Image (spheres, rainbow, N blue to C red):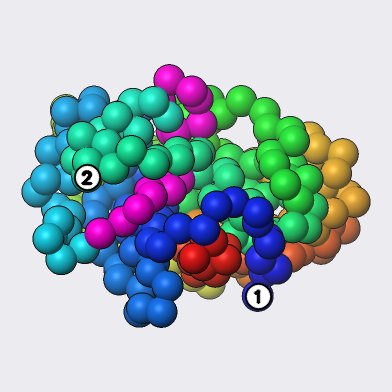
Amino acid sequence: MPQICKTNLPVMPSILVVESGSTKTDWCLLAKGKKALHFSTAGINPHLQTKENILQLLQTELRWNKKKHHADKIVYYGAGAGSTAKQKLIAGVLKKHFGIDKIEVNGDMMAAARALCGTNKGMVSILGTGSNCCYYNGNKIAEQKPSLGFIAGDEGSGNYIGKRVLQYYAYNTFDAELKLAFEQLFGNDVQAIINKLYAEPFPNRYLAGFVKLLIDTRGHYMTENIIEDCLNDFFHHHILKYRNSWKLPLYFTGSVAYEFRDVIENLCNQYELELGTIAKSPMDGLMAYHKKQL
């Protein structure tokens, strides 16, 4: 379990903690002496959605009863919310929907850092639909290189790996076994797949869906090669660019990191790096962190 930061922030009777990726958003209402309430909606990413889109999502998917539920403060962590402009956009949407003034918006890297490291220093990585990496000094993100997003970056992510799977099928690289497995999951109409990829919203989510083929066919040599190559790209382009990677433990969170944690462990051994925790989601750690404020 991660160490939890002992914060000196003002005590709040109730806090709504939000952790959002591009695919899924987890909402958790914490109140002193009460059982935590959990909600779930589709993902939120202000780089891919307008404030109107996000507001509509909240209105249609979030089962929030204003008469029954109350939060004194909202703490939001999300993909695409690392810049001041996007943080203001998210805060404005949340204020309009919930009618709450005390709102704190952070990027998804801060969620991972607080949840996994607490007050400890560490190298923190997210490998979900998208990917990113940072050096956390136990209090704040002290070093983080730019993310090029789902079009030009996201190495090692579900989007990145899914793109490779689609290429292997469309370019007839798969052997007969994997070709059949792909068609059973996604069909054999490449043009229809291309149309959906370029015509519909959230292409990163759509590409990440192709990762299921690799999950279902673990042990096949081509499957293992794709997984290792894509995750090694993340190590090469991100983790190995930080000097602190050889000094501090490496922490990972996200669906891809958790699903292929054995490959991450092997890569850490290969590069002689210390592996810390691999968590599917940062929410448990965030809940423990923010309970200290109640």
Amino acid under label 1? Met
Label 2 environment density (alpha carbons within 10 Å; few <14, some 14–19, many ≥20): some
| Magenta stretch in the rendered image | 70-86
In this rendering, position of residue 132 left or right of residue 251: left
| Residue 86 found in image quarter | top left
Does the magenta-highlighted stretch encompass residue 73? yes
Residue 124 showing in the rendered view:
yes
Q: Which quadrant is the N terminus positioned in?
A: bottom right
Q: Earlier in the sequence, mark 1 or mark 2?
A: 1
Q: Residue 25 appears at what percent x and percent y? A: 32, 53
Disc number placed over residue 98 in the picture, else none? 2
**Element marked by disc 2:** helix
- Identify the residue at horizontal 72%, vertical 47% (top origin): 139
From the viewer's side, name the closer residue of 1 and 272: 1
- Identify the residue at horizontal 22%, vertical 41% (top origin): 99
Amino acid under label 2? Phe
In this rendering, position of residue 35 left or right of residue 118: left
Q: CA distance from mark 1 to mark 2?
A: 32 Å
